[in-house]
Image (spheres, rainbow, N blue to C red):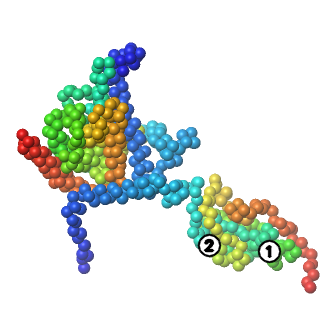
Amino acid sequence: MAILIKQVELSWLDRTYVWPILKGMAITLGHFFRQLFTPTSKRFTIQYPEMKKEMPEGYRGLHELKRFEDGSVKCVACFMCAEACPARCITIEAEEFSELNLTQGFEEKRPKRFEIDLLRCIFCGMCEEACPKDAIWLRKDYELVGTDREALRYGKWDLLNTYAEPDGKPVIKTDPTPSTPSRKEVACS
Amino acid sequence: MPTLAHLLHLSPETLWMVAKVLIVFGGPFTLASLLTWVERRGAAMIQDRIGPNRAALFGKWRLLGLPQIAADGIKAFLKEDLVPPHVNKLVFWVAPLLTFLPAVMGFAIIPFGQSFVSGGQTYHLSLLDPGNGMGMLYPLAIGSMAVYGVLTAAWSSNNKWSILGGMRASAQMVSYEIAMSLAVITIFMRAGAYDPHQIIQAQWGLWNVLPQFLGFLVFTTCMFAETNRLPFDFAEGEAEIVAGYLTEYGSMKFALMYLSEYVHMVTASALIVTLYFGGWRVPFVADPGVWLSVLAFLVKLLFFCWLFIWIRWTLPRFRYDQLMKLGWKVMLPLSMANFLFHAFLMFKRG
C-alpha cells in the first residue's frame, strides 16, 4: 500500500516566504545572542585541554590495580582476568609470597609481573567482572597516549599508579611487603 | 588636505586619488577577510558552538580567534600550488583573477561618505567622481563580469563537477540579473538620475526602502543569487558536485576565489545601502559631515554584510529547479510589478 503523504496547506502569509524567513531569522538571532552571552563554562562545547568531560557512571576507561590501605597489592595472581580477557592482552607472572604479619589476607601468591597491552585491550570490562578480589577496576580516565607501542604496555607499577594523582594518593614504586618470600613458621594458636 | 599634499610634494588631486584607491581597494579587502572571521564565529554562535578560537599571536594572545585569519592566509600561501595535469593552464591561472577583480572593481563607484570642500576644492568620497557618465550602470556591468570568473574556473578545470557547478552558477546569475536590473531601473526612474551621488541626493528625507520595499526585497534576493551565497549557493554542493567550480583549486588560488565571495558580499551590501538605504545619510541629520557620514555608511554596510551571514545560517538551500522557478516566475514579475507601479505613480503625478 502506498503511503499517503500529508499535504500541508500553507497560509498566504507563509507563501510569501518573507514572514517565515523573518521568524527563522529571529530564532537564529536569539541563539546567537544567547550563546554570545553565555559564559564559557556553561556552553555545550567542552574546551578540551582546559575543560574535561565528566564521564558517566559505568564508563570503562584506563585500568587500575587496587591496593590495600598499607599499600600492598590486592591482586593474588589467580589468572582469572587473563582467562576472561577476550583480547588476550593481560600477561601475569605469579610469584610466591607469604607474610601473614604484614598483609591483611592470607594470600600466598602475588603478581611478579602484571602487564596489560593497552593497544590490544578493547576495554570490555571482563577482567573487572572476573576478578574475585576486586583488584582490577576500569575507571574513567580516557586520555591514553604513548609515543610508541612499548609505552602502551602498562606494567604492574604503572597500573598501580594510574589513578594515584586524581585520587590524591602517593605514587609507589616498591612493594611495602618484602619481595623475597620468607618461609618461617608461624604459630597457630 | 592641501597642506598635507604640499608636504608630500603632490597636487591635492593626486594625493586624494592615491588615498581613494588605497581606501577603495584596501577597504573591501580588509573587510572581506574580517568577514571570514565573522562568518565562522557568527555561524558558531548561531549554532550554539564556539568556533575557531585557538589561533594565537605568538602562542599567547587569542584575541577572540582573530589571528585565525592570518593563520589561514599563511597556510594558503605555504601550501603546494598544485595544478592538475588535465586543466587548461592559462585559463586556470587567470580564473581566480577574473573572479576577484570584478568583485573589488564594483566598489569604485560607491560614495562612502559625504563630499567635502577643502581649500576651495570639492573632494568626493568615491573613486569615480560624479558625472563620469557611467553611474550605477558600472557596478551592474562589472557585477555581471563575475560570471566569467566562475565559468572560466569551471571550464578550465576540465572536471565534471566543476563544469556542472559553473553552469549552474552562471545560469543562476544570468536569470537573477534581469529582475535585479528592473528593480534598479525603478530607482533610476524615481531619482531621475543614475549617478550614485544623485541617487543619494534624491533619498533626502525618505530612503528608497520605504516607497520601494518590494524592489528592495527583489534586489536583496537577487544579490544573494549574484554573490552565490546561501540559500542560492549552487556553484558548490558538497553532496552533488563536491566543491563545484572550486574542486580543482588549492592553496592561494582557492583562497582568492573564496575571498572574492566575501568581497562580492561587501560590494553587494554597498549597493544595497546606496540604492535603498540612503548611502551615507544619517537619519534626522541634514548635513552629517565627513566622519559621521563615513561612519553611517560603514554601519549600514556592516549590517548588510551581517545580513548575508545571518540568512546563510537561517535558511536551507533551494533545489535547482526551485531556484529557477523563484527567479523567473516570482522575482521577475515582482520587480516588473514594482516598476510598473512606480511608473504609474509618476504618470499620475505628472
* Residue A97 % position (x, y): 83, 73
* Residue A8 % position (x, y): 24, 69
Q: Residue furthest bottom?
A: A189
* Residue A145 % position (x, y): 62, 57
Q: Nearer the viewer, mark 1 or mark 2?
A: 2
The mark tally for this picture is 2
Q: Is residue B237 or residue A35 the one in the foreground?
A: A35
Which residue position is annotated with label 1? A109
Identify the residue at image location x=49%, y=60%.
A44
Q: Secondary structure at mark 2?
A: loop
Residue B297 visible from this viewpoint: yes
Alpha carbon distance from label 1 to label 2: 23 Å
Identify the residue at image location x=57%, y=42%.
B60
In the rendered image, the vertical position of residue A120 relative to residue B40, given as above or below? below
Inspect the image, locate mark 2, and give the three-letter code of the amino acid beneath it.
Gly
Which residue position is annotated with label 2? A125
Quadrant (top left/top right/bottom left/bottom right) for the C terminus of chain B:
top left
Q: Is residue B333 left or right of residue B154?
A: left
Q: Evaluate whether label 1 is on the same chain as label 2.
A: yes
Quadrant (top left/top right/bottom left/bottom right) for the N terminus of chain B:
top left
Identify the residue at image location x=68%, y=74%.
A81
Residue B85 visible from this viewpoint: no
| Chain for disc number 1 | A
Q: Is residue A6 or residue B207 the one in the foreground?
A: B207
Identify the residue at image location x=23%, y=37%.
B204
Circle 1 Cα neighbour tier, 10 Å, few/some/many (<14 / 14–19 / ≥20): some
Q: Is residue B147 or residue A18 the one in the foreground?
A: A18
Say which label, 1 or 2, has the lower sequence index: 1
Inspect the image, locate mark 1, and give the three-letter code of the amino acid beneath it.
Lys
